Image: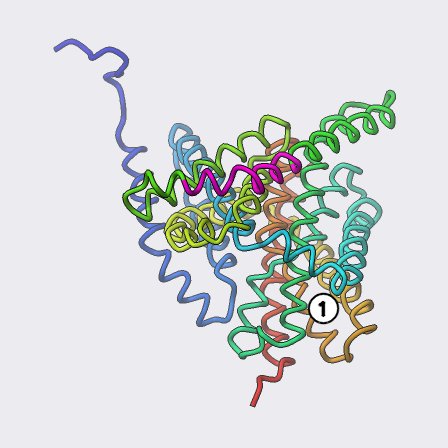
Protein backbone atom coordinates (compact mmCIF):
# COMPACT_ATOMS: atom_id res chain seq x y z
CA UNK A 1 0.00 0.00 0.00
CA UNK A 2 1.30 3.44 -0.90
CA UNK A 3 1.61 6.14 1.71
CA UNK A 4 -1.20 8.76 1.54
CA UNK A 5 0.13 12.19 0.63
CA UNK A 6 1.15 14.23 3.64
CA UNK A 7 0.65 11.41 6.20
CA UNK A 8 3.90 9.86 7.47
CA UNK A 9 3.86 6.12 8.07
CA UNK A 10 6.04 6.51 11.17
CA UNK A 11 3.35 8.43 13.09
CA UNK A 12 3.24 7.29 16.71
CA UNK A 13 -0.25 7.64 18.22
CA UNK A 14 1.05 7.23 21.78
CA UNK A 15 1.65 10.93 22.40
CA UNK A 16 -1.69 11.94 20.88
CA UNK A 17 -3.53 9.31 22.87
CA UNK A 18 -1.87 10.38 26.10
CA UNK A 19 -2.76 14.00 25.33
CA UNK A 20 -6.42 13.10 24.84
CA UNK A 21 -6.41 11.12 28.08
CA UNK A 22 -4.90 14.12 29.89
CA UNK A 23 -7.47 16.52 28.42
CA UNK A 24 -10.24 14.11 29.34
CA UNK A 25 -8.90 13.87 32.89
CA UNK A 26 -8.83 17.67 33.19
CA UNK A 27 -12.46 17.94 32.10
CA UNK A 28 -13.60 14.99 34.21
CA UNK A 29 -11.78 16.11 37.36
CA UNK A 30 -12.76 19.77 36.95
CA UNK A 31 -15.99 19.54 39.00
CA UNK A 32 -14.20 17.54 41.71
CA UNK A 33 -11.44 20.17 41.87
CA UNK A 34 -14.01 22.96 42.22
CA UNK A 35 -15.96 21.14 44.92
CA UNK A 36 -12.80 20.31 46.87
CA UNK A 37 -11.67 23.95 46.74
CA UNK A 38 -15.07 25.16 47.96
CA UNK A 39 -15.00 22.74 50.88
CA UNK A 40 -11.51 23.88 51.81
CA UNK A 41 -12.54 27.53 51.48
CA UNK A 42 -10.02 28.14 48.68
CA UNK A 43 -10.53 29.87 45.32
CA UNK A 44 -11.07 27.52 42.40
CA UNK A 45 -8.16 29.15 40.54
CA UNK A 46 -5.79 27.93 43.26
CA UNK A 47 -7.02 24.37 42.77
CA UNK A 48 -6.40 24.48 39.02
CA UNK A 49 -2.92 25.98 39.48
CA UNK A 50 -2.05 23.10 41.83
CA UNK A 51 -3.59 20.71 39.28
CA UNK A 52 -1.24 22.21 36.68
CA UNK A 53 1.76 21.86 38.99
CA UNK A 54 1.03 18.15 39.41
CA UNK A 55 0.34 17.63 35.70
CA UNK A 56 3.48 19.55 34.72
CA UNK A 57 5.62 17.50 37.10
CA UNK A 58 4.21 14.27 35.63
CA UNK A 59 4.77 15.43 32.05
CA UNK A 60 8.46 16.04 32.70
CA UNK A 61 8.92 12.27 32.64
CA UNK A 62 7.69 12.11 29.02
CA UNK A 63 10.06 11.84 26.08
CA UNK A 64 11.16 14.91 24.17
CA UNK A 65 8.64 14.35 21.35
CA UNK A 66 5.55 14.29 23.57
CA UNK A 67 6.39 17.28 25.78
CA UNK A 68 6.16 19.94 23.00
CA UNK A 69 2.81 18.49 21.88
CA UNK A 70 1.40 18.87 25.39
CA UNK A 71 2.85 22.35 25.84
CA UNK A 72 1.58 23.61 22.47
CA UNK A 73 -1.91 22.22 23.03
CA UNK A 74 -2.30 23.54 26.56
CA UNK A 75 -0.78 26.87 25.48
CA UNK A 76 -3.45 27.36 22.80
CA UNK A 77 -6.22 26.37 25.23
CA UNK A 78 -4.73 28.71 27.84
CA UNK A 79 -4.76 31.64 25.40
CA UNK A 80 -8.40 30.91 24.61
CA UNK A 81 -9.02 30.72 28.35
CA UNK A 82 -7.50 34.20 28.84
CA UNK A 83 -9.73 35.58 26.09
CA UNK A 84 -12.81 33.96 27.64
CA UNK A 85 -11.86 35.20 31.10
CA UNK A 86 -11.35 38.83 30.14
CA UNK A 87 -14.25 38.95 27.67
CA UNK A 88 -16.55 37.92 30.50
CA UNK A 89 -14.99 40.51 32.84
CA UNK A 90 -15.75 43.18 30.26
CA UNK A 91 -19.23 41.85 29.47
CA UNK A 92 -20.20 41.93 33.14
CA UNK A 93 -18.98 45.51 33.52
CA UNK A 94 -20.71 48.61 32.20
CA UNK A 95 -18.81 51.67 31.06
CA UNK A 96 -21.41 54.21 32.14
CA UNK A 97 -21.79 52.50 35.51
CA UNK A 98 -18.01 52.51 35.99
CA UNK A 99 -17.88 56.22 35.19
CA UNK A 100 -20.67 56.85 37.70
CA UNK A 101 -18.59 55.08 40.36
CA UNK A 102 -15.58 57.36 39.92
CA UNK A 103 -16.62 60.17 42.32
CA UNK A 104 -17.07 57.78 45.27
CA UNK A 105 -14.35 55.24 44.52
CA UNK A 106 -11.71 57.32 42.73
CA UNK A 107 -9.57 58.25 45.75
CA UNK A 108 -9.31 54.68 47.06
CA UNK A 109 -8.77 53.37 43.54
CA UNK A 110 -6.01 55.84 42.60
CA UNK A 111 -4.14 55.55 45.91
CA UNK A 112 -4.22 51.75 46.01
CA UNK A 113 -3.22 51.33 42.35
CA UNK A 114 -0.39 53.87 42.54
CA UNK A 115 0.79 52.64 45.95
CA UNK A 116 0.82 48.94 45.10
CA UNK A 117 2.44 49.58 41.71
CA UNK A 118 5.21 51.57 43.42
CA UNK A 119 5.60 48.90 46.13
CA UNK A 120 5.89 46.10 43.57
CA UNK A 121 8.39 48.06 41.50
CA UNK A 122 10.50 49.01 44.55
CA UNK A 123 10.63 45.48 45.99
CA UNK A 124 11.56 43.96 42.63
CA UNK A 125 14.04 46.65 41.58
CA UNK A 126 15.77 47.46 44.86
CA UNK A 127 14.89 44.57 47.16
CA UNK A 128 15.54 41.76 44.68
CA UNK A 129 17.84 43.66 42.29
CA UNK A 130 15.80 42.69 39.24
CA UNK A 131 15.91 44.73 36.02
CA UNK A 132 13.68 47.78 35.55
CA UNK A 133 11.49 46.04 32.91
CA UNK A 134 10.95 43.09 35.25
CA UNK A 135 10.13 45.48 38.10
CA UNK A 136 7.52 47.15 35.86
CA UNK A 137 5.93 43.74 35.24
CA UNK A 138 5.79 43.05 38.99
CA UNK A 139 4.41 46.52 39.73
CA UNK A 140 1.67 46.13 37.13
CA UNK A 141 0.71 42.71 38.51
CA UNK A 142 0.66 44.12 42.05
CA UNK A 143 -1.77 46.87 41.01
CA UNK A 144 -4.51 44.40 40.09
CA UNK A 145 -6.83 42.51 42.41
CA UNK A 146 -9.13 39.49 42.19
CA UNK A 147 -12.76 40.33 42.78
CA UNK A 148 -14.03 36.75 42.65
CA UNK A 149 -11.85 35.47 45.52
CA UNK A 150 -13.05 37.89 48.20
CA UNK A 151 -16.54 38.55 46.86
CA UNK A 152 -17.35 34.85 47.27
CA UNK A 153 -16.92 35.25 51.05
CA UNK A 154 -18.98 38.47 51.15
CA UNK A 155 -21.73 36.75 49.17
CA UNK A 156 -21.57 33.64 51.35
CA UNK A 157 -22.12 35.78 54.48
CA UNK A 158 -24.90 37.83 52.87
CA UNK A 159 -22.86 41.06 52.82
CA UNK A 160 -22.31 41.55 49.09
CA UNK A 161 -25.11 44.12 48.98
CA UNK A 162 -23.81 46.15 51.93
CA UNK A 163 -22.28 49.59 51.44
CA UNK A 164 -18.74 48.23 51.92
CA UNK A 165 -19.47 45.26 49.67
CA UNK A 166 -20.64 47.54 46.87
CA UNK A 167 -17.58 49.76 47.35
CA UNK A 168 -15.38 46.65 47.05
CA UNK A 169 -17.11 45.71 43.80
CA UNK A 170 -16.61 49.22 42.38
CA UNK A 171 -12.93 49.52 43.29
CA UNK A 172 -12.03 45.99 42.20
CA UNK A 173 -13.58 46.53 38.77
CA UNK A 174 -11.69 49.82 38.37
CA UNK A 175 -8.49 48.08 39.54
CA UNK A 176 -8.82 45.43 36.86
CA UNK A 177 -9.45 47.97 34.11
CA UNK A 178 -6.49 50.13 35.13
CA UNK A 179 -4.27 47.02 35.29
CA UNK A 180 -5.40 46.11 31.77
CA UNK A 181 -4.49 49.59 30.50
CA UNK A 182 -1.11 49.44 32.28
CA UNK A 183 -0.49 46.01 30.74
CA UNK A 184 -1.31 47.33 27.27
CA UNK A 185 1.19 50.17 27.72
CA UNK A 186 3.78 47.81 29.18
CA UNK A 187 3.49 45.28 26.34
CA UNK A 188 3.97 48.06 23.83
CA UNK A 189 7.03 49.56 25.50
CA UNK A 190 8.87 46.41 26.66
CA UNK A 191 10.69 45.88 23.33
CA UNK A 192 12.09 49.43 23.54
CA UNK A 193 13.07 48.99 27.19
CA UNK A 194 14.93 45.80 26.32
CA UNK A 195 16.53 47.28 23.21
CA UNK A 196 19.75 48.48 24.81
CA UNK A 197 21.20 51.46 26.65
CA UNK A 198 21.98 53.76 23.71
CA UNK A 199 19.28 56.43 23.52
CA UNK A 200 17.09 54.27 25.74
CA UNK A 201 15.16 57.15 27.30
CA UNK A 202 14.32 58.72 23.94
CA UNK A 203 13.45 55.36 22.42
CA UNK A 204 11.23 54.40 25.37
CA UNK A 205 9.53 57.81 25.31
CA UNK A 206 8.85 57.56 21.59
CA UNK A 207 7.55 54.03 21.99
CA UNK A 208 5.31 55.12 24.88
CA UNK A 209 3.84 57.95 22.80
CA UNK A 210 3.10 55.55 19.93
CA UNK A 211 1.55 53.00 22.28
CA UNK A 212 -0.66 55.61 23.94
CA UNK A 213 -1.79 56.87 20.52
CA UNK A 214 -2.61 53.31 19.41
CA UNK A 215 -4.40 52.61 22.69
CA UNK A 216 -6.45 55.81 22.38
CA UNK A 217 -7.38 54.89 18.79
CA UNK A 218 -8.33 51.36 19.82
CA UNK A 219 -10.44 52.49 22.79
CA UNK A 220 -12.03 55.15 20.57
CA UNK A 221 -12.86 52.49 17.99
CA UNK A 222 -14.43 50.31 20.69
CA UNK A 223 -16.48 53.30 21.86
CA UNK A 224 -17.74 54.02 18.34
CA UNK A 225 -18.58 50.34 17.81
CA UNK A 226 -20.43 50.17 21.15
CA UNK A 227 -22.52 53.28 20.47
CA UNK A 228 -23.19 53.07 16.72
CA UNK A 229 -22.68 49.51 15.45
CA UNK A 230 -23.03 47.01 18.28
CA UNK A 231 -26.84 47.12 18.62
CA UNK A 232 -27.22 46.70 14.84
CA UNK A 233 -24.71 43.84 14.84
CA UNK A 234 -26.51 42.09 17.72
CA UNK A 235 -30.00 42.72 16.29
CA UNK A 236 -28.99 41.43 12.84
CA UNK A 237 -27.45 38.26 14.26
CA UNK A 238 -30.46 37.74 16.48
CA UNK A 239 -32.72 37.74 13.40
CA UNK A 240 -30.36 35.39 11.57
CA UNK A 241 -29.91 33.02 14.54
CA UNK A 242 -32.35 30.17 15.02
CA UNK A 243 -31.12 29.36 18.55
CA UNK A 244 -29.75 31.40 21.49
CA UNK A 245 -26.48 29.48 21.12
CA UNK A 246 -26.08 30.81 17.58
CA UNK A 247 -26.40 34.39 18.83
CA UNK A 248 -23.83 33.70 21.56
CA UNK A 249 -21.38 32.35 18.98
CA UNK A 250 -21.93 35.40 16.74
CA UNK A 251 -21.21 37.79 19.61
CA UNK A 252 -18.13 35.77 20.51
CA UNK A 253 -17.02 36.03 16.89
CA UNK A 254 -17.36 39.80 17.03
CA UNK A 255 -15.44 39.85 20.30
CA UNK A 256 -12.63 37.76 18.82
CA UNK A 257 -12.42 40.13 15.84
CA UNK A 258 -12.01 43.10 18.19
CA UNK A 259 -9.43 41.15 20.21
CA UNK A 260 -7.53 40.36 17.01
CA UNK A 261 -7.35 44.07 16.17
CA UNK A 262 -5.74 44.67 19.57
CA UNK A 263 -3.23 41.92 18.81
CA UNK A 264 -2.36 43.50 15.45
CA UNK A 265 -1.82 46.86 17.15
CA UNK A 266 0.83 45.28 19.36
CA UNK A 267 -1.33 44.73 22.42
CA UNK A 268 -2.35 41.35 23.75
CA UNK A 269 -5.52 39.72 22.42
CA UNK A 270 -6.45 39.39 26.09
CA UNK A 271 -6.57 43.19 26.36
CA UNK A 272 -8.71 43.27 23.23
CA UNK A 273 -11.06 40.67 24.70
CA UNK A 274 -11.66 42.81 27.78
CA UNK A 275 -12.50 45.90 25.73
CA UNK A 276 -14.61 43.76 23.39
CA UNK A 277 -16.64 42.66 26.41
CA UNK A 278 -17.01 46.29 27.46
CA UNK A 279 -18.17 47.19 23.94
CA UNK A 280 -21.00 44.65 24.17
CA UNK A 281 -21.79 45.29 27.85
CA UNK A 282 -24.04 48.32 27.29
CA UNK A 283 -26.55 46.23 25.30
CA UNK A 284 -28.89 44.18 27.56
CA UNK A 285 -29.57 41.82 24.67
CA UNK A 286 -25.87 41.05 24.32
CA UNK A 287 -25.41 40.72 28.08
CA UNK A 288 -28.16 38.10 28.17
CA UNK A 289 -25.95 35.85 26.05
CA UNK A 290 -23.68 35.55 29.10
CA UNK A 291 -25.73 32.52 30.14
CA UNK A 292 -24.84 30.69 26.94
CA UNK A 293 -21.27 31.91 27.11
CA UNK A 294 -20.91 30.32 30.56
CA UNK A 295 -20.38 26.90 29.00
CA UNK A 296 -17.41 28.09 26.96
CA UNK A 297 -16.10 30.05 29.94
CA UNK A 298 -16.29 27.00 32.21
CA UNK A 299 -14.61 24.86 29.57
CA UNK A 300 -11.73 27.16 28.61
CA UNK A 301 -10.81 29.23 31.67
CA UNK A 302 -9.43 26.33 33.78
CA UNK A 303 -6.82 25.67 31.10
CA UNK A 304 -5.31 29.11 31.70
CA UNK A 305 -4.70 28.38 35.38
CA UNK A 306 -3.60 24.81 34.65
CA UNK A 307 -1.06 26.05 32.10
CA UNK A 308 0.25 28.55 34.66
CA UNK A 309 0.92 25.65 37.02
CA UNK A 310 2.44 23.54 34.25
CA UNK A 311 5.04 26.23 33.51
CA UNK A 312 6.35 26.32 37.07
CA UNK A 313 9.35 24.07 37.62
CA UNK A 314 8.99 22.26 40.97
CA UNK A 315 12.68 22.95 41.66
CA UNK A 316 12.16 26.67 41.01
CA UNK A 317 9.54 26.85 43.77
CA UNK A 318 12.02 25.66 46.37
CA UNK A 319 14.80 27.80 44.91
CA UNK A 320 12.51 30.86 44.84
CA UNK A 321 10.85 30.33 48.22
CA UNK A 322 12.51 33.36 49.80
CA UNK A 323 11.63 35.48 46.76
CA UNK A 324 8.04 34.25 46.87
CA UNK A 325 7.68 35.04 50.57
CA UNK A 326 9.06 38.56 50.10
CA UNK A 327 6.77 39.24 47.13
CA UNK A 328 3.80 37.76 48.99
CA UNK A 329 4.36 39.97 52.04
CA UNK A 330 4.85 43.05 49.88
CA UNK A 331 1.73 42.30 47.84
CA UNK A 332 -0.48 41.64 50.87
CA UNK A 333 0.73 44.52 53.04
CA UNK A 334 0.79 47.12 50.25
CA UNK A 335 -2.77 46.39 49.15
CA UNK A 336 -3.99 46.45 52.74
CA UNK A 337 -2.23 49.72 53.61
CA UNK A 338 -2.93 51.61 50.39
CA UNK A 339 -6.59 50.62 50.44
CA UNK A 340 -7.18 51.21 54.15
CA UNK A 341 -5.51 54.63 54.29
CA UNK A 342 -7.89 56.46 51.91
CA UNK A 343 -10.86 54.31 53.00
CA UNK A 344 -10.52 55.57 56.59
CA UNK A 345 -11.59 59.00 55.35
CA UNK A 346 -15.09 57.70 54.55
CA UNK A 347 -15.66 54.61 56.72
CA UNK A 348 -14.83 53.17 60.13
CA UNK A 349 -11.68 51.18 60.88
CA UNK A 350 -13.37 47.77 60.76
CA UNK A 351 -14.94 48.34 57.35
CA UNK A 352 -11.70 49.84 56.01
CA UNK A 353 -9.76 46.80 57.24
CA UNK A 354 -12.22 44.38 55.62
CA UNK A 355 -12.03 46.35 52.38
CA UNK A 356 -8.22 46.27 52.44
CA UNK A 357 -8.10 42.52 53.12
CA UNK A 358 -10.62 41.93 50.33
CA UNK A 359 -8.33 43.69 47.86
CA UNK A 360 -5.32 41.49 48.74
CA UNK A 361 -5.82 38.56 46.33
CA UNK A 362 -3.90 38.64 43.06
CA UNK A 363 -5.30 35.93 40.83
CA UNK A 364 -6.78 36.28 37.36
CA UNK A 365 -5.60 39.68 36.13
CA UNK A 366 -2.23 39.55 37.93
CA UNK A 367 -1.51 36.17 36.35
CA UNK A 368 -2.59 37.49 32.94
CA UNK A 369 -0.04 40.31 33.34
CA UNK A 370 2.82 37.91 34.12
CA UNK A 371 1.69 35.36 31.52
CA UNK A 372 1.38 37.87 28.67
CA UNK A 373 4.66 39.65 29.50
CA UNK A 374 6.47 36.32 29.55
CA UNK A 375 5.06 35.50 26.11
CA UNK A 376 6.05 38.88 24.62
CA UNK A 377 9.39 39.38 26.41
CA UNK A 378 10.61 36.14 28.06
CA UNK A 379 13.72 37.88 29.39
CA UNK A 380 11.57 39.98 31.75
CA UNK A 381 9.92 36.99 33.44
CA UNK A 382 12.48 34.36 34.41
CA UNK A 383 11.59 31.07 36.07
CA UNK A 384 12.34 32.70 39.43
CA UNK A 385 10.04 35.66 38.74
CA UNK A 386 7.28 33.42 37.41
CA UNK A 387 7.44 31.04 40.37
CA UNK A 388 7.51 33.96 42.81
CA UNK A 389 4.40 35.54 41.31
CA UNK A 390 2.56 32.21 41.31
CA UNK A 391 3.36 31.97 45.03
CA UNK A 392 1.92 35.48 45.46
CA UNK A 393 -1.30 34.30 43.81
CA UNK A 394 -1.52 31.17 45.93
CA UNK A 395 -0.66 32.96 49.19
CA UNK A 396 -2.91 36.00 48.84
CA UNK A 397 -5.83 33.98 47.44
CA UNK A 398 -5.72 31.63 50.44
CA UNK A 399 -4.97 34.21 53.16
CA UNK A 400 -7.65 36.80 52.33
CA UNK A 401 -10.68 34.46 52.61
CA UNK A 402 -9.33 33.02 55.87
CA UNK A 403 -9.10 36.50 57.43
CA UNK A 404 -12.45 37.64 56.03
CA UNK A 405 -14.33 34.67 57.46
CA UNK A 406 -13.15 35.78 60.91
CA UNK A 407 -13.46 39.55 60.53
CA UNK A 408 -16.74 39.92 58.64
CA UNK A 409 -19.88 39.91 60.76
CA UNK A 410 -22.88 38.44 58.92
CA UNK A 411 -26.22 40.29 59.22
CA UNK A 412 -28.65 39.04 61.87
Q: In which quarter of the image is the C terminus?
A: bottom right
Q: Residue at x 40, y 31 (%)?
A: 69
User: Magenta span: helix, strand or loop, mainly?
Assistant: helix
Residue 118 place in picture, x, y as percent: 81, 51
| Residue 409 within the segment the image draws in magenta | no
Q: In this view, does 362 lie above or below 82?
A: below
Q: Residue at x 62, y 68 (%)?
A: 399
Q: Is residue 231 above or below residue 377?
A: below
**Mark 1 residue element:** helix
- Residue 354 is at least partly visible in this image: yes
Q: Quadrant of residue 165?
A: bottom right
Residue span colored magenta: 219-235
Residue 40 place in picture, x, y as percent: 47, 71
Q: Which residue is drawn at 59% across and 61% down?
A: 147
Nearest the eye: 299 or 128: 299
- Colour treatment of the image: rainbow
| Residue lying at the far left of the rendered structure | 1
Q: In which quarter of the image is residue 94?
A: bottom right
Q: In which quarter of the image is the N terminus?
A: top left
Q: In this view, does 198 lie above or below 45?
A: above
| Residue lying at the far bottom of the rendered structure | 412
Q: Which residue is drawn at 87% across and 25% down?
A: 202
Nearest the eye: 202 or 248: 248
Using a 10 Å C-alpha cutoff, classify the residue at mark 1 as few (fewer than 14 neighbours), some (14 to 19) or many (20 or more): many
Nearest the eye: 139 or 339: 339
* Mark 1 lies on residue: 356
Amino acid sequence: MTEPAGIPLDFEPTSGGLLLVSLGAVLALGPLTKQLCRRLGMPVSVGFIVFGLILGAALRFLDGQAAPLFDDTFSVLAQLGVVALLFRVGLRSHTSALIDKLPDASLIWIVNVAGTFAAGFAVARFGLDWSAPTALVVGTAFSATSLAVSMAVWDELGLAGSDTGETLLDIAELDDLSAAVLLAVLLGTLPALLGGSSGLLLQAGTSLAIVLAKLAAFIGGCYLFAHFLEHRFTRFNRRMSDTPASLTISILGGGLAIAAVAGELGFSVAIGALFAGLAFSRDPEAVRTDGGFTYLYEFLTPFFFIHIGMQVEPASILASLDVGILLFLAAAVSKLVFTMAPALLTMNRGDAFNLGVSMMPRAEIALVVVYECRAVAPATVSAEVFAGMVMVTLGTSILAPLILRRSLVPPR
